[in-house]
Image: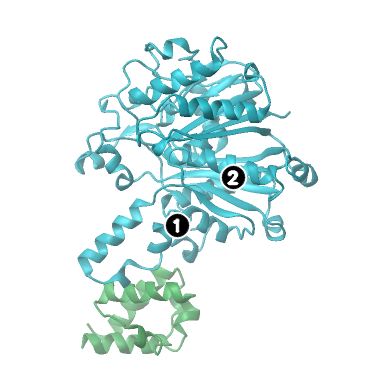
Amino acid sequence: MEKQELIAKINEVLAEEFEVEIEDITPEANIKSTLMLDSLSLVDMVALIESEFGVKIKGTEVSSILTFEALYDFIYERLA
Amino acid sequence: MNNRRVVITGMGIYSCLGKTLDEVRESLYTGKSGIIFDQARKDMGFRSALTAHLEIPDLKKELSRSQRVYMPEQAKYAYVATCEALKNAKLDQDYLDKHEVGLLYGNDSSADPVVKSVDTMREKKDTTLVGSGAIFQSMNSTVTMNLSCIFKLKGMNLTVSGACASGSHAIGLGSLLIKWGLQDCVICGGAQEVNPFSIGSFDGISAFSSREDAPTKASRPFDRDRDGLVPGGGAATVVIESYESAVKRGAPILAEVIGYGFSSNGDHISVPNVDGPARSLRMAIQQAGIDLREIGYINAHATSTPKGDQNEAKALFNVFGDYRPEITSTKSQTGHEMWMAGASEIIYSMLMMKNEFIAPNINFENPDEDSAKLNIPSVRVEKKFDTFLSNSFGFGGTNSTLIVRDIK
């Protein structure tokens, strides 16, 4: 999958699951504040990424993924 | 402070007879059945695929994702019922924020999220994939934990698990908290999930009616040819508070909870006896401090099982003797609403009392030896009454009886 295609897909599933406008998801935006995630719903994001893209994000890794750009890169690298 | 009057100031319901009090009143009046045949259950290997039918409410507009994700179906039913009850009781969020309003709700299972979580864990070997909602959906206290957070309640916060008497005990225990001055207002009720997972094991002990060719005829409490219960569900909320609190708020005062009786059979795990229910009945009447002839209507527990109905009929006859007020089981229309039943049947009886009728015990075509001694109408009765008694009994031999008196 091309990276732009992957980004579009990531944005789509996140917007649908967390009920936010897809336009609000920009590369530099903060994931937690944009998706309104607390410590519990962060688990749902990890589960969603794993079930949709087959990419597992460990607990130690998720704390360093702050922006959507970081998330795109993380998933893209694991799929490469 | 230890003998305060307890009044009902609001009610709300979500059941197979309707999604509002008005719809349910109409269904009761016309004797409508809420029972259907569910092919999905048959495909799962159910002996009986009969069930009450209701839709899971879509709360996307009312609640955020982070609120909904922790709610199993019965919590959604309870939310809808509670919104209606709070509105009718004139309780707004500002009042809930400033007072210690309690919450006591009956619930005794949450099978669907448990089964789905375990399926995920078995298949994926990864607990993260069950998601954040599963633990909160799976616990027995799921209804009270969800409602207390959504409505930001600050008083007693507890789930009552007393099998099929859960909802009745919730109201009874809530009334004691108010009577003793420990709470001014308590949101009470009962909720029951309706998915197949929750009652497959109940079907497995041949407790359900197998009259699959005639779903609306299957639940036939007290009838000679009854062959088992039909599972139902939904949620019912009853707001109770001290008389003083209700007057101070200018709340609608609908009726008074004047008696709560309870007992345990100390006997078989599933087969009810006569002595336990009779003691619960007598205790409620004694607590109410009334002559039993003041009771104008009895809403029986009667679930349509051969032994259960027989023994309740014996208990009622033992207690009431030659005084024969109308006795019906609304389970003839709703099926057995189990953890919810004790609360919903207070609402059904309230709707009848306020609208001066007694809903028919549908499908009561031929009495047996014990039900023949009781006054069980199979057609609607137009009747004014101002006091009713409601029985609820459960597995393990837990019994609860409530007596409610009208306030006009």
Select label 2 or label 1 by which is in front.
1
Per the image, the residue denoted by label 1 is: B71
When asked about the image quadrant of residue B284, the answer is top right
**Which of the marked residues, 2 or 1, is nearer the chain's N terminus?**
1
Q: Secondary structure at mark 2?
A: helix
Outermost front residue:
B266
Q: Are marks 2 and 1 in contact (CB under 8 Å)?
A: no
Residue B90: image location, x then y, percent: 70, 46
Q: Residue at x 27, y 25 (%)?
A: B211
Shade representing chain A: green
When asked about the image quadrant of residue B194, the answer is top left
Is B115 placed left or right of B222 in the picture?
left
Colouring: by chain
Is B73 placed left or right of B44 in the picture?
right
Q: Secondary structure at mark 1?
A: loop
Q: Which mark is residue B84?
A: 2
Q: Amino acid at mark 1?
A: Met
